[in-house]
Amino acid sequence: MAHFSYRGRNREGAEVNGRVEAASASMAASQLSSEGIIPVNIEQVTAAAGTEQSQKKSTQIRLFQKITLDELIMFSRQMFSLTKAGVPITRAMRGLANTVQNPLLSETLSQLADDLEKGNALSSAMRKHPKVFTELYVSIIHVGENTGQLDLAFRQMAGYLELEQQTVKQVKQATRYPMFVMIAITIAIAIINVFVIPAFKSVFDSFGGEMPWQTQVLIAISDFTVNWWHSMLAVLVLAIILFIRWKRSETGRLTWDRKKLKFPIVGPIFYRITLGRFSRTFSIVLKAGVPIEQGLSIVANAVGNSYIGQKVAGMRQGIERGESFTQTAHQAGMFSPLVMQMLAVGEETGRVDQMLEEAAGFYEQEVEYDLKNLTSAIEPILIIAIGAMVLVLALGVFLPLWELSTTING
């Protein structure tokens, strides 16, 4: 079949363009009309040119574009509505590919439609795009295909992603004020070191005399900063690059994920967020009908923390040895006694998925409460930091000026 590039208008009258695969130009026009697109111009694309153009466009898209959580939620919601209405999956993918604004998502949906037309399953096609669809997403879609409830699978993923989005927004909102204050303090210290203290130094030198040790320390730090700022900047950039490379390694990622759970103030929040994500994800997996061993493998890669993921993988090994879910959860040492009691009741009644969902709600409520109080918990630290900076300036800069003023007036 040949490839045709087209330009036309959709039902809303907006101009759209793209590519379709058909036996002839008339068949391509019929296909576009069935999708609600009125073609204005259709041209056949040669295989070589089409492949080269597609590869070039695909490379550019992958370098400069990414799919946001909002776009993935919207895609899931739209697919739920379309599949529930009985629209064929291939037609739904083609239609969404022509309407979405993100080029990367549009290209991904077009490739999914191409794979579906070749007879591949949707989950298999999605697995080829790991940067767009997580293992959890693919697994839920796979179960939905096998059970004939693909629409419900898309709805489940939309709900899960919306909860993830809500958590991300809460974290950003809670950390916005502390981050702004810390950036302001850093900028103020840099300005004082580079501009303010050197100006005072010339004043001190003109009057002569011995300066207090606090002033001498400030001047030494300022001189070092002014003379070696380029080296300090290079070291900082190098340290950031090395840290990122270390964190991306398996050992570094495991160590960092374990350490950040023990950070003062924010460590417990990270821990509860991870446990809430585990409970919510595992609940969705069990409700979808995924076997518990396979579900734990999926969740281990979806919790967003390799240290907790390692503990989840250990739970799977325990279940494979014949231990109960509650026993393996207790050995992992991740959950509070209250949640452990909830899981025990769920296992006894055969409703582990429901108990996990309630545990997820419990952790999410704790996270919401902690994030609301995060600013009030960090404020004393910020006030102390600002007070210390003012004290240093008072002792190191204004104290010599007071002494000089007393000497002149005395």
Image: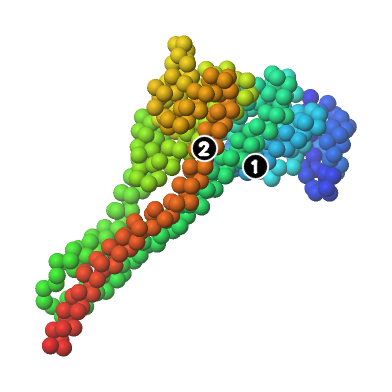
Q: What residue is rendered at 73% in x and 38% in y?
A: 78
Can residue 226 be seen? no
Q: Return the residue at label 2.
A: 362
Closer to viewer: mark 1 or mark 2: 2
Q: What residue is rendered at 43% in x and 51% in y?
A: 374
Q: Is residue 293 left or right of residue 45?
A: left
Tell me which amino acid carries mark 2. Answer: Phe
Tell me which amino acid carries mark 1. Answer: Glu
Q: Return the residue at label 1.
A: 71
Image x and y of residue 235, in percent: 31, 49
Front residue of this view, candidates 175 and 10: 175
Secondary structure category for the residue under label 1: helix
Q: Earlier in the sequence, mark 1 or mark 2?
A: 1
Q: Identify the residue at the far left of this view.
A: 210
Q: Identify the residue at the far top of this view.
A: 322
State which quarter of the image contains the N terminus: top right
Image x and y of residue 28, in percent: 84, 32
Res. 196 image quadrant: bottom left
Res. 308 image quadrant: top left
Q: Is residue 38 left or right of residue 158?
A: right
Q: Is residue 307 left or right of residue 132?
A: left
For residue 87, above or below residue 178: above
Front residue of this view, candidates 239 and 142: 142
Secondary structure category for the residue under label 2: helix
State which quarter of the image contains the C terminus: bottom left
- State how many labels appear: 2
CA gap, disc 1 and disc 2: 28 Å
